[in-house]
Structures are given as C-alpha cells and as structure tokens.
Amino acid sequence: MRLPPQRSEATPLHRLNNASPADLRGALLACCGSRRWAESIAAHRPYPDIGALLAAADEASYDLTDEDLAEALTGEPAAGAGPGGPLYGGRHIAITGPGALAAHTALRAAHAAYESRFGHAFVLCVDGVCEEEALGHVLTAIRTRLGNEAEQERTVAAEELRRIARGRLLRLAREGTPPGRPRQPPRPAGPGASVPAPAGTTSPGRAPSPSVPD
C-alpha cells in the first residue's frame, strides 16, 4: 500500500509520520505481518530521521512473542510462489542455464521438507547477496536450517524476518512504497530462460544491490 500523497516537498518519511492510522497500518503490515509490530511502529511516531525509524523497527521485532512471530510468518508469501520463480523477502532469484530444472527441483524439495518439519514458509533475507551466488546461498541456508530444532529455528526465522521487515521499511521511508508484495515479473519465455529480477535487485554480471544495514 502506497502512503497517501501530500504536498510535493514532503518526504516519504514525513508522509509516514503524518499518515492516518488506517493508511499507515496497511503500509506497515506490508512490511511485517505482525499487528503488534505495526502498532509499535505507529505508536512511536513521529520519527526525526530514518535511523530512528529503523531502530524502532528492530526493537519491535525483538519484542515479538511466539504468537506474533507465527502471525508474521503466516503473512509471508511462500518462496517460489507465482510465475516469477523463487522469491525471498521480496527479491526474485534468477535461475538460468542447463541446470535450471534441477535447481528448481532441488528448491521445491527443500522447501517442502522445511514446511513439513516446521509448519511455516521458509524466510530468508538475501539483501546484499549477488545474483550469481544467490541460489547457492539459499540452498545452503535451507539445508542447514533443516537440521535445527524447533526452538532454534524460531530464533533464526525471527532474525530473518527482522532483516526483511527492516529492508521493506527502509524502502517505505525512502520511496513511499514498501516492497513486501512486489508485482510478479513476466513468465520466462521457455526452458532455461532467465527470471528477471525486480527493480533494485541485480542481474547476472552486475554488482549486487546495496545491502540493508543490520
């Protein structure tokens, strides 16, 4: 949800500070699906700068209960859902070349195993990971986390959600639009075709997108 426009000189952070509760709630829930998280961010307005906003976001994330975390995880789209291919924290991962089919198969199997073990979608922040390393990064993370006990995995998932929410909120404060539910890119033309990355991410051969400070 885009924050409502105000006078032309108003910054996105200014609009966030002055948005109506209903408008702000929708924008914040697109950053993190926990109502407690969204209410905490809204309650501490106004924010003098983006740093203060991100600090409040971190504090709200650390305060989430197990029930809040479950609510936030339920609101996250399953990675790989939709025609855009693998999706992690709002970023699509391009899978190309002759091994693309095998890679998709491995990802589907890993996600199915994860969801069967833990009962929720796998979440992973890939900010700062370059395109050519992203697939290996994802597969390593999900296979490693499959070995976690439930309590340990809740801690890891909560940290990944914190980083994802922080990145989305940063975009909201800079651009006025959270990237939590991005538009799906066009379906690839055929087998082995590249899945295009959305604006703000990388393409093969280009530098990685700027990472969000932890």
Image: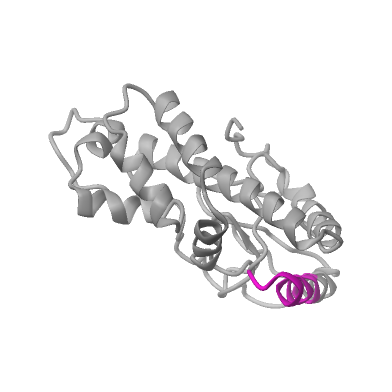
The figure's colour scheme reads one colour
| 152 w.r.t. 6: above or below | below
Kindly identify the residue that appears in the image at 79 percent across and 75 percent down.
113
Q: Is residue 61 left or right of residue 17?
A: right
Residue at point 29% right, 39% down? 43
Give the total number of marks visible in the rendering.
Answer: 0
Give x and y (percent) for residue 130. 72, 43
Viewer-side residue, 137 vs 95 = 137
The picture places residue 172, in percent across and down from the top left corner, at 38, 42
Q: Quadrant of residue 10?
A: top left
Q: Quadrant of the C terminus?
A: top right
Q: Nearer the viewer, residue 11 or 141?
A: 141
Whether residue 1 can be seen here: no
Name the side, left or right, on which 177 lies relative to 73.
left
Residue drawn at (85%, 61%) of the image: 143
Is 180 left or right of 12, judged from the image as shown?
A: right
Which SS does the magenta portion mostly show?
Answer: helix
* Residue drawn at x 62%, y 50% as measured from the top left: 158
Is residue 118 rendered magenta in the image? yes
Which residue occupies the extreme top position in the image?
48
Residue 157 percent across, percent down from the top left:
66, 54
Is residue 188 shown above or below 133? below
Q: Is residue 209 visible?
A: yes
The picture places residue 164, in percent across and down from the top left corner, at 56, 47
- Say if the magenta span includes residue 26: no
| Horizontal arrangement in the rendering, residue 92 relative to residue 38 (left or right) | right
Q: Nearer the viewer, residue 52 or 86?
A: 52
In terms of image quadrants, where is residue 119? Answer: bottom right
Q: Which range is magenta?
A: 107-120
Quarter of the image with the N terminus is: bottom left
